[in-house]
Amino acid sequence: MTESPHSVEPTRDGEAHRQAVASASARKEDHIRLAADQRREDPAVKGHNEFDDLEFLHHALGGIDNATVDLTAQVGDWTWSAPLYINGMTGGAETAMRVNRALAIAARELNLPMASGSVGIAIDDPATAASFRVIREENPDGFVMANIGAGRPADHGQRAVDLLEANALQLHLNAVQETVMPEGGRDFADWLRGVERTVAATDVPVIVKEVGFGLSRRTLQQLQEVGVQIADVSGLGGTNFARIESARGGNAFAYLGNFGQSAAACLLDAPVAFPTLLASGGVRHPLDAIKALALGARAVGVAGPFLLPALEGTPETLTDEIRSWLDQLRMLHAMLGAATPADLTNTDLLVRGRVREFATLRGIDVAALSDRSGARLQEER
């Protein structure tokens, strides 16, 4: 979950600051409750999304031995045990402590990277830091990503990293959420320069991500120009913060519920030269993750599908759920004849529906994706 980078900054008035922090903590609880409600009730979250516009061309004799599949993923300079990570969800509230503990235990048991929710509230009020620190306490040797908002001062990124002894910093862009959030910030003019300053001021790699509205080709080009090497396109289709914040504010912005681009559209739109792309947003099951990898993502982040098991189950049931995802990812690789995640970029993919329309309007030729395996065979010959 995210928080306004402007709404809880310390002030000289101690009581006003305490009230602001209490309001931010209450907002975190609202985020968890409303996100969980979306998982239970909103058909837009579990129903059709633009990953369904992607279809693998089935080759009945193209499979390989499941035992030969190597899920190891290369993400920048890091080697991850699988092309899957637990994306940032929450922190700074009582419920968040329980959720983050369960997620961190699962990450530890399965050797998966994990991101925190936005650490801004803990920077403003150290009393809330325990709900973030539990991630590192439960997973002392794992790969952890701290998270902070792009509107924050540049040194807050390093402070978030230090709090979690993090291996990387997720810097989130959430202009749509801020616009809809009743107490949100409205000044986005300096965000690009802020990203550049944060990259320079942070001693671990910075991963820039959206919060569910997508990163366009132009945005990715701008990020690369200021030194960003890894980006999570985080597209439309999963937990929807426009709807969450609109519900908190009386639904005044309900019309922004479908604003933005999907992860599938963003991956197609991305500049070829961008160093490392990650994908999240609308990933409902392992097949969606496989499709994102086939479009060039190095790894896929999942949050929403793991929220209810973390919130309502036990760490063991959550771990079993994520282990099942990993088993299915391996089996889908074998079925598609891909020995590694990188090999999925040689699978044949049909693009239909809204994603095809998007590609046409953006001047992207998707026809070549339907015969990538044939082109690969020609090269090998």
Image: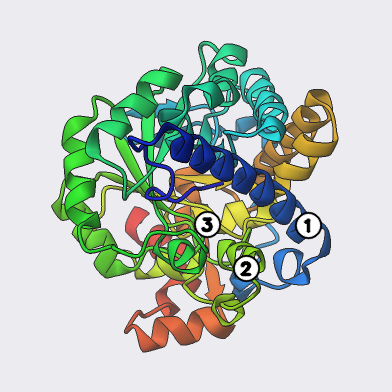
Which comes before the other along the chain, label 1 or label 2?
A: 1
Quadrant location, the C terminus:
bottom left
Q: Is residue 93 visible?
A: yes
Residue, disc 3: 292
Say the numbered circle drawn on residue 37: 1
Q: Which of 350 and 183 lies nearest the eye of the viewer?
A: 183
Residue 243's tag is 2
- Quarter holding residue 34: bottom right
Residue 204 left/right relative to 232? left
Q: Secondary structure at mark 1?
A: helix
- Residue 273 horizontal side relative to residue 335, left or right: left
Looking at marks 3 and 1 on the same chain, the residue that comes earlier in the sequence is marked by 1
Placement of 170 over or under 125, stated as above or below? below
Amino acid at dot 3: Ala
Residue 133: x %, y % from top left: 54, 19
Mark 3–mark 2 distance (CA, rounded to whole Å): 24 Å
Does residue 210 appear left or right of residue 48 in this picture?
left
